[in-house]
Amino acid sequence: MNDLSEDNEEIKLKKEEIEKVLQKLESKLQEYDELKKTLEESDINEINMTDPDAKLVKFGFHQGIDVGYNIQAAADAKNNLITTFEVTNNSADQGQLYNMSNKVKSIFDVDSIESLADKGYFEPADLKKCEENKIVSLRALATKATSTLSDTPPSGTRNLHSMEDIIVKMIDLESEINADIDSLVDLKREFVFIIKKINNPEYQTLLELRYLCFKTWEQIAVVMGYDLRYLHKLHGKALENCEINFKEDTKRH
């Protein structure tokens, strides 16, 4: 009889525990339903339970995505002091050039200002706003958009053209670098094609390690298990094979 009573008591306790768990689950479901309703009714696609103002932000190419903010700041070129700042949860800088420049313009209470920003801020609509409000974007000048903004700098813009010349040179150099990168990519693509035509796996591995992975001869020797003398001999044969394939392709064409 005592055993039966104890069993009944244990069942009752388990039932109460289950009911408590179910109540918690129902409460959570109700909470999630409310969050879903908020998402549907508002113009947002995420909710942060810890910090409602924080959102998923892309922090550069190598840093990935994390919850945080995008801090915008404008500094006075003369005194190198931060004039104003703004915290946003939009990872893109586009659209912020006019916003921040106009704030600075209001703070200094001036008719026109010069604003220098990197190419991450480039947005045609934003540059148009800058033009309409006498905000000269030096980045826009450097990218040959001078005619879009104004042919005549606003009053008080000393050394504008010298600054423009410097930035134009920077842009030209940037273009040259990009052209070199494109050439290297094309060269690499051509070399990969040549390597793939080699039938000898050892030759392929050696050339890939040396010219695509940029390994040193010592590193290649360790990977392939050969001494340096034999490795250089193997390298010569691999290049000869490449030359033969190249000549055969040239004859066909």
Image (cartoon, rainbow, N blue to C red):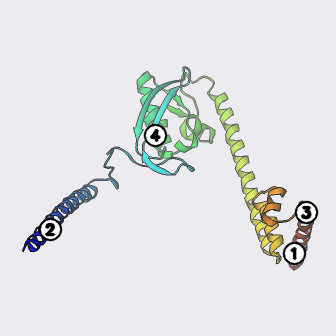
**Which residue carries the number 3 mark?**
232
Residue 139 circle label:
none
Vertical position of residue 240 compared to residue 56: above or below? below
CA gap between label 3 and label 2 equals 80 Å
In the picture of the structure, the residue carrying the numbered disc 2 is 10
- Residue 212: percent from the left, percent from the top? 76, 61
Task: Decide which of tag 3 and tag 2 comes sooner along the chain.
Answer: 2
The residue carrying pointer 1 sits among few (fewer than 14), some (14 to 19) or many (20 or more) residues within 10 Å by Cα, namely some
Q: Are marks 4 and 1 in contact (CB under 8 Å)?
A: no
Between marks 3 and 4, how big is the CA–CA gap?
A: 56 Å
User: Is the C-beta separation of discs 3 and 2 under 8 Å?
Assistant: no
Residue 125 at x, y percent in the picture: 47, 45
Identify which residue is drawn at 50% across, 41% down: 127
User: What is the three-letter code of the residue carrying label 2?
Assistant: Glu
Drawn side of residue 60 relative to residue 105, left or right: right
Q: Is residue 252 visible?
A: yes
* Amino acid beneath label 1: Asn
In percent of width and height, residue 219 lies at 79, 57
Q: Residue furthest top?
A: 79
Front residue (pair 225, 89): 225
Q: Nearer the viewer, residue 212 or 13?
A: 13
In this figure, which residue is indicated by the disc labeled 4? 96
Secondary structure category for the residue under label 1: helix
Cβ atoms at labels 4 and 2 below 8 Å apart: no
* Residue of label 1: 245
**Left or right, residue 252 beside residue 112:** right
**Label 2: how many residues lie within 10 Å, few (<14), some (14-19) or many (20+)?**
few
At a point 68% along the width and 33% down the height, the residue shown is 166
For the residues bearing labels 3 and 1, Cβ distance under 8 angstroms: no
Within 10 Å of the Cα at label 3, are there few (<14), some (14-19), or many (20+) other Cα atoms? Answer: some
Residue 123 x/y as whole percent:
51, 46
